[in-house]
Amino acid sequence: MAKVFVIAEHRDGRLKKSTFELLGASAAAGNETHAILLGDGVAELAKELAHYGAQKVHLIQDAALKLYSSEAYTKAITPVLKSASPDIVLASHTPTGRDFMPRVAARLGVGLASDCTQLAFEGSKIKARRPVYAGKATVEVEFLGAGPQLATVRANALGAPKPDTSRTAEILNVTADLSGLKTKVIEVVKGASGRPDVTEASIVVSGGRSLKSADNFKMIEEMADVLGAAVGASRAAVDAGYRPHRDQVGQTGKVVSPALYIACGISGAIQHLAGMRTSKVIVAINTDAEAPIFQVADYGVVGDIFAVVPALTQELKKLKEH
Amino acid sequence: MNIYVCIKQVPDTETKIKLNADSSGIDLAGIKWIMSTYDEFAVEEALRLRDKNPGSTVTVLSAGPARVVDSIRTALAMGADNGIHIDLPETADNNMAAKALAGALKKETKIDIVFTGKEALDDGAAQVSQLIAEYLDAACATVVLGTEYSGSSVKVRREVEGGAIEVIEAPFPVVVAAQKGLNEPRYASLPNIMKAKKKEVKALKAADVGISDSDQKLRFKNFQLPPPKQAGKKIAGDPAAQAKELARLLHEEAKVV
Ligand SMILES: Cc1cc2nc3c(=O)[nH]c(=O)nc-3n(C[C@H](O)[C@H](O)[C@H](O)COP(=O)(O)OP(=O)(O)OC[C@H]3O[C@@H](n4cnc5c(N)ncnc54)[C@H](O)[C@@H]3O)c2cc1C
């Protein structure tokens, strides 16, 4: 059994599914599971952390934590970890987790295994595996020296746990000294789409150069909206200006690991595969039966996206209506 | 202004990765090495900032085995003024590399701004910029898409999730980690490639920057190649039939929709 701390992540008043994955995995392994919850006016969220397995919630509330900043998070989290001496500290490998966790690691003088795609608890230790060379290989991470083991875990890697609404947690209010911060968060400008982020979505529908225009991506968006999915794109589609770079999947874009990845008119270049090959189920729709994407696809449709994609959207809509 | 760029040399993205005999690492033979893609945006940003501020210099640093000097020369050929190479073993982890880079930076008289890429293409860890900032006690901004400089601080636009943009202001000294889209990196011209060959690259040993074995916190071991994928199912028929069958399989067999 290990003493595990999970750094809870939330945005717009809602906890991240990826936080629940970490809590669920730790609790399922029988660990003493703590959460650290930071923000301003976020106490309500502690209940939900308990439903997913947190036995204790260290609640740090401060006006300086209203908007996320890596500096404020680092400064607030580090003393809690120093005094509690956990065996393991976990966060999600999201834009937030990957930003502050290295700084926490430096202040604790320990290593951080980032972007783990496999994680198991063994006694008071973790056994972690992560991709290297854009998923062309994976490695086991060995921690050297003393101190807690820190890891960030890729969203969707551990699987969604079921909440148990009868569980409650002890709430520990913690005050943080957040004076003397160097950086100032001026504003957060929201993205326009209501769709989930491509790195966190359970389903991603992606389109390639073959879409031929930004306008044609509407058919990708329609399928995504039926599935509650995020929209992704190949670099060729991004370079052609059909989608913003933040949607790019691949070695120089986002790395995603959804339960379902649907590649529409994407050839499957090695740099694209680097961003999506750990997806659990891969669908490819492509006119070229020899396209490399079919080598990683679980389901392949040799066909024209302009015919297959709208038809598939209709079929999926029917499924959802049942 | 004293401007610094920390870069990493990584295998070209087309490289076929093979493991060494005991799976303790990859087979380094035949790899084509390049400057990590995001670092090119960092170098470009540094050059543009220098050119807007006469009297500034751009110094490029890289920590790693002797081969990384080639990538320092690539940055010099793009237009950087000076290079510093810190000799570290092939197996150095992010912590050791960041501490070595910070150690070399601390030897400089004054640091205004340090650029890096937002992550390296080989391990994709996205740790080194934040670690350098910690070891320098400097401010830090990661995944930066836009910059606005004023005397002794910078306002950056950083990419967060779901297309949201965070605007933060950080005083110098600051570490800025570049995201694709920050700028359009230039190509090195032939005369500049020739000139770069003559520029001096300062050589430092690990001990010169206070690095010892205990600075290595992680070791990667037991390398594996991804298991070969089972051949997938090809779905035949006209588009309507294909769509229907695919939806059925996703629902009933794969259970993902
Ligand atoms: C350093 C580097 C980094 C890179 N990083 C990335 C990255 O992060 N992400 C990325 O995606 N790429 C990346 N690339 C680019 C990559 O090599 C490919 O060029 C790119 O992925 C191709 O995109 P595509 O599949 O949309 O286009 P193409 O390769 O042009 O393929 C289009 C595909 O669509 C099919 N098609 C055409 N019409 C139809 C139709 N009507 N119906 C169905 N199918 C159709 C074709 O058969 C073809 O397979 C990188 C390259 C380099 C050198």
Image (spheres, coloured by chain):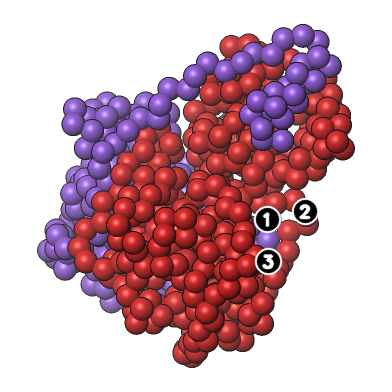
Indicate the quadrant where residue A300 lies. top right
The tag on residue A92 is none
Q: Amino acid at mark 3?
A: Arg
B32, above or below A161, in the image: above
Q: Which residue is mark 3?
A: A14
> Which is nearer the eye, A49 or B97?
A49
Q: Chain of mark 1?
A: B
Left/right of residue A165 with respect to residue A70 in the rendered view: right
Q: Amino acid at mark 2?
A: Ser
Quarter of the image for the N terminus of chain A: give it.
bottom left
Whether A176 is drawn above or below A42: the answer is: below
The three-letter amino acid code for the residue at tag 1 is: Gly
- Mark number displayed over residue B162: 1
Mark 1–mark 2 Cα distance, whole angstroms, equals 8 Å
Which residue occupies 26% across, 68% down? A147
- Residue B110 appears left or right of A153: left
Q: CA distance from mark 1 to mark 3?
A: 14 Å
In this rendered view, identify the residue nearer to me: B119 or B66.
Answer: B119
Q: Residues within 10 Å of mark 1 (few under 14, many from 20)?
A: many
A117, A292: nearer the viewer: A117
The colour assigned to chain A within the rendered structure? red
Q: Mark 2 — on which chain does it sit?
A: A
Q: Which quadrant: the C terminus of chain A?
A: top right
Query: Which residue corresponds to mark 2?
Result: A193
